[in-house]
Amino acid sequence: MTTNGQYVTNEGLEKLREELNQMITVERPAISKAIAEAREKGDLSENAEYDAAREAQGLLELKISKLQNLIANAKIIDESKLGTDKVGMLNKVTVKNLKTGAKMIFTIVGETEANLAEGKLASSTPIGKALMGRKKGEKVDVKAPAGLLQFEILDISI
C-alpha cells in the first residue's frame, strides 16, 4: 500500500502512536479472548459470537495496518520554519466570506488532526486547498459542495 505521507505535528503523531498502542495492547487481546471463549462453546459453523469476534478481529487488524502505514509515512511539520507571508500548514488564517460578510478563523492542519469544531481545517479540503500558498489580501474562489464560495484573506498568523 503506497501512501503519500500526511502532514502531522509532533503532538498529532504522538496521538496516533497512542491510538495504535491502545489497539495492539488492549483491543487485540480482548478480541482474541472473545474468539477463544466463542470457540469453547462448540460448533463454529453455527456460532454467531465466533463469527462476530472474527469479523471484529479482521476490522481491527485493518485499522492497525492503516495506522502503522500512516505513522511510517507521516511528514512531521517543522514548526520553527513556519512563516506568515503565505498560507501554509499550521497557519491560522482569518477569512471573510464575501457573500455573507462572516469572518472565520481556520488553522490549516493535516487530515488526521482536522476538527472543524476547533477551527482546525484539513489542507486537503476544498477550502484548505484554495487557501494554501495564498497571501493576505487575496480573494479566493472555492468550489465546495454547497456551490462557489468567495473569501478574502484578512490575516495569516502562527
Image (spheres, helix red, strand yellow):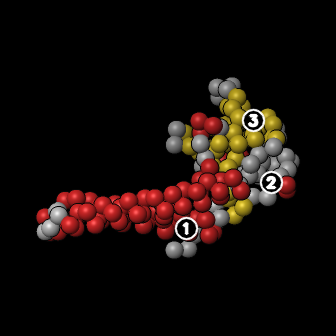
Q: Residue 134 appears at what percent x and percent y?
A: 78, 48
The vertical placement of 150 against 110, above or below, is: above
Q: Residue 104 appears at what percent x and percent y?
A: 69, 32
Q: Earlier in the sequence, mark 1 or mark 3?
A: 1
The image quadrant that residue 70 belongs to is bottom right
Please tell me whether mark 2 sits on a helix, a strand or a loop.
helix
Q: Is residue 110 visible?
A: no
The image quadrant that residue 55 belongs to is bottom left
Left or right: 110 as drawn, with respect to 88? left
The vertical placement of 8 against 119, above or below, is: below
For the residue marked with disc 3, what is the amino acid? Thr
Residue at mark 2:
79
Q: Residue 77 appears at what percent x and percent y?
A: 75, 58
Residue at mark 1:
68
At 72% from the left and 61% from the top, the residue drawn is 76
Say the numbered circle drawn on residue 94: 3
Count neighbours of disc 3 (C-alpha within 10 A) and say few if under 14, some if 14 to 19, many if 20 or more: some
Q: Residue 94 appears at what percent x and percent y?
A: 75, 35
Q: CA distance from mark 1 to mark 2?
A: 24 Å
Contact between labelled residues 2 and 1, with CB atoms less than 8 Å apart: no
Q: Earlier in the sequence, mark 3 or mark 2?
A: 2
For the residue marked with disc 1, what is the amino acid? Gln
For the residue marked with disc 2, what is the amino acid? Glu
Please tell me whether mark 1 sits on a helix, a strand or a loop.
helix
Count neighbours of disc 2 (C-alpha within 10 A) and say few if under 14, some if 14 to 19, many if 20 or more: few
Q: CA distance from mark 3 to mark 2?
A: 19 Å
Looking at the rendered image, the disc whose residue lies closer to the viewer, 3 or 2, is: 2
Seen from the viewer's position, the closer of residues 26 and 101 is: 26
